[in-house]
Amino acid sequence: MNLLTSSEMAKKWGISSRRIAILCSEGRIAGAVKKGKTWLIPSDVPKPSDARRSDSDDISEDGLKKDDRTKVKLDEIVDYATGKIVHNNPEEAYRQEFEHILIDDLGYPKKNIDIEVIIQRGANRNAEKADIVVYRSEDHCQENAYIIVEIETPKKTYDVQALTYITATTAPYAVWYAGMEKNSKGPYYHYRDMGVDPIHFMIIPTLPRYGETQEMIGKYHKGDLKPAKALKLTFERMYYHLYGTGPIKREENIAVEIIKLLFCKIIDELAPEDLCEFRATPVELKSDSGKAEIRRRIDGLYAKLLSDPDYGEMFKDETLEYDNESIAYIVSILQGLSLTDEETNTDALGDAYEVLLPSTLKGESGQFFTPREIVRFAIEVIAPNYSKKEYILDTACGSAGFLSVALENIRKQINTLYANRGFSKEKKRGMLKDYAGKYVFGCDIDPLLYRISKSYMAIMGEGKGNIYNLDSLDLTNRLDPNFRRSVTEGSVDIITTNPPFGTQIKDTRRDVLRTYDLGHKIINGEPTNEVLEGQDPDKLFLERDISYLKEATNDADGGRMVIVLPKQNLSGAKEESVEFRKWLLKRVQITAIVDLPREAFQPHTGTKTSLVFLKKVRNIPDNYPIFMAVSEAVGHDRRGLPLYKKDSNGTDLRNDKNERVIWNDLPEILDRYKEYTEKGFLNNTNTDGGPSCFIVYSSNIMQDSARRIDAWYWDPNKNNIAKQIEESVGDDIKEIVRLGDLVVDHGIFYPGRHKRNYVEAGENSVPFYSGTQILQVRPFDIKYQPIDYAPAKNHFVDKDWILITRSGSTGRVVMVTDSIAGSMVTEHVIRVICDKNLVDPYYVYAYLATEDIGKILLEKGIYASVVDHITPDFVATIPVPRLAPEKEKEIADRVREAEKKRDEANKEFIAERNSIESIMFENMKTE
């Protein structure tokens, strides 16, 4: 048998020798053997099927070559369409956005798409790169180009001249895109008729979907409509275009008009006629008369909407305020989608609806919309039951987040229960509609949110008008009569709600407050006759919602509820907070408490919150178990951006599809909760590094003078010293402050990684210290890097900075003194730059260096893979006790003097060491 090396086979097969070596190591080339470092391969073995991009074995589901999975660096991402590794920057983010539109919304196959494509122009060999090219088929040749997309840098002004190079191709469609922002017009779509005028592009409102021609657009039958997948991008594009170019400028008015058109589309989709009325052809869009014809059809749908018994009341005495131009645009964007299809992504729909919310509704009056991850978790725990025909209510439904996910849960139950009955989609949709119409209710005080939630529920399949525009806290006799007939005290099985919180606005209506226990001063958990001047709305919502829950019987527990509450209500030390908890513990049985991270409702508010699960029981047991958990991440950071899991090197973790893994620990908590409910017990450990989940017995809470019910307080996995510090304010300790509040802006960080460039010591180089070396009294084997080495420019440290090792020997603390100031320090060390106007850094340094406090606090932030790590975000949360200013100064001055003496001692040692060397070299004989 003739054996060839991998290099020889590479020439034979036309692929890289490195790729062949990888295939050999994976056992995918028959007969390959390794001799030393060289692979030897039988000369007659067939070429591996995955050697080319089009071979599926070499490509993951997202298109990434499998041997490329380990190549993704911190500043790189995997291209959504092709799986290629690309540099992450704002322009690239726009390309990824538009690829989602092409693939998720318009349906173009990934195999028909490429990026960074060379477009040849004429015989002079001039060429330009196209950012995205969509081909008619999998044949990626220039003559087969169908859509060419030009991606521009953020905020660049639209210029059709940027598309001139596209005339060198036969692509009929071109796109200019520079992102979607509030004042932008979104993507510019262009079409040229190759048979009439192949040189000039005309602007069109949208691209054809995969498989469509220009002539087919706007002639849709109901069966032609496709489920909506990329709705948030679609809504953003539509909303921002209308904001920038439409005649209406107030955010809430834009939202109302879009909702009217959404309802027109829903009415059209549910109508029995096969031909869609909600449509706009390219020919119609070219002329004023055509746009008037589109308007005529929409006016007809709006008339049907106004006469609809379930939805017409919302728009009574209102007209369509948008002009023909704007209405035609909205129709052109939405016409090909099926909003009511059960395959429409309801999570994406919820995100899309929040695009319509004006900024005044994203935080004012405490209206913070519950992130989808939290809603899903809450619904899974509360577990609505279709077979039991349970009533579901949200008294502060906002944009219907909880209710829509509850309905989605019911939909899945219907599909599972009747999987083998042969029921059609229409039959099962009718069952969902019937359930929603009879058993699902919601209300909200805000008129716009009422309309949004109403349309959302209509899309979800809710057939009757069970969403009400009312003040849930008002006197019962002032509520909508239809609501009062449907929802009465003691009638509801499940309540899921996130009432307004995090606001200084209290309900001060005396006639309302006197009807609530919590509208009165509470003593020993019972209301007195003293009516309060005002009360937090979230507490009143809790009481009202408890009253709606079904009463327990001898045979069964009563209704159950999940509510989002500010953590202060669960942990506050003030008398009113303690009495609130006493009142609550006397009236319901708490089943679970899940503390959410501070980022849960950011960027709108940093208020810490918890999910409280409770139920009505006939007699509250003297001692019962409560499931508790402390969530550390729910999928986004404090800016609202996705939060990704990272490995010990700070690199994003990826799943088997090579997608970055969102850090959301609620699914893990859900698994532990289900384990608890199935087994009846739970081990109070989190040795696997997951979220802390444990059981607390109510008797322990009742013995606690403050009746604290927040999970963090009872967490056996948290160090008691942190709790003791938080509660140590007294004569000597004036207050407790987070370290993150004592530093300059971005004052806790570490620089990015860089390629080392070691040189000899000299005038143009500086020492480069490792994490180990900064801890040594006399650092050994110091390396040097050029003083002007750009990749390491962020590695310099300045005097009075505090350094904390973040990996390996984690949590060791060092002060930057004259001896290393101006040098470079590895990125494996966290920098802390104290604001000297707020605190002396030497006091903070001394505190962090304490053996029995600082060291333990830092160790609690350790997470481990192979090497222990801590993060700047964790370091920022460390509680720092503030002493009297003179005491802090006394400590800081002594520590400063000690560090100075240490430096002087080292200098003296080095001087004497060098003196010995000089003497020896001067007297050594040389040949």
Image (spheres, rainbow, N blue to C red):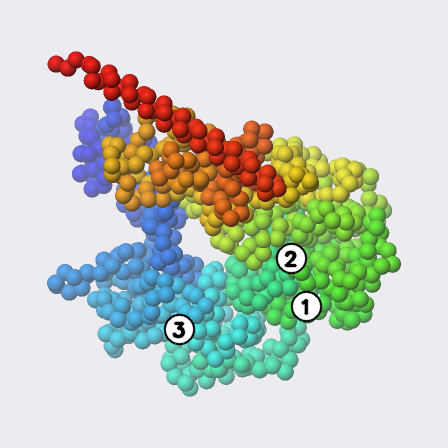
CA gap between label 2 and label 1 equals 17 Å
Q: Earlier in the sequence, mark 2 or mark 3?
A: 3
Q: Which of these two is toward me, 662 or 464?
A: 662
Judge whether 470 appears above or below 750 on screen: below
Q: Position of residue 354 (x, y in %)?
A: 54, 63
Q: Earlier in the sequence, mark 1 or mark 3?
A: 3
Amino acid tagged 2: Gly
Tell me if 917 is positioned left or right of 679 in this view: left
CA gap between label 2 and label 3 equals 42 Å
> Which residue is identified by label 1?
445
What crowding class fits label 2: few (fewer than 14 Cα within 10 Å), some (14-19), or many (20 or more)? many
For the point 29% across and 33% down, the residue is 784
| Secondary element at tag 1 | loop
Q: Position of residue 351 (x, y in %)?
A: 53, 60
Tell me if 188 is positioned left or right of 719 in this view: left
Amino acid tagged 1: Ile
Q: Which of these two is toward me, 340 or 472?
A: 472
Tell me if 324 is positioned left or right of 668 in this view: left
- Looking at the rendering, in which quadrant would you find the C terminus? top left
The quarter of the displayed image where residue 520 is located? bottom right
> Which residue is identified by label 2?
502
The quarter of the displayed image where residue 505 is located? bottom right
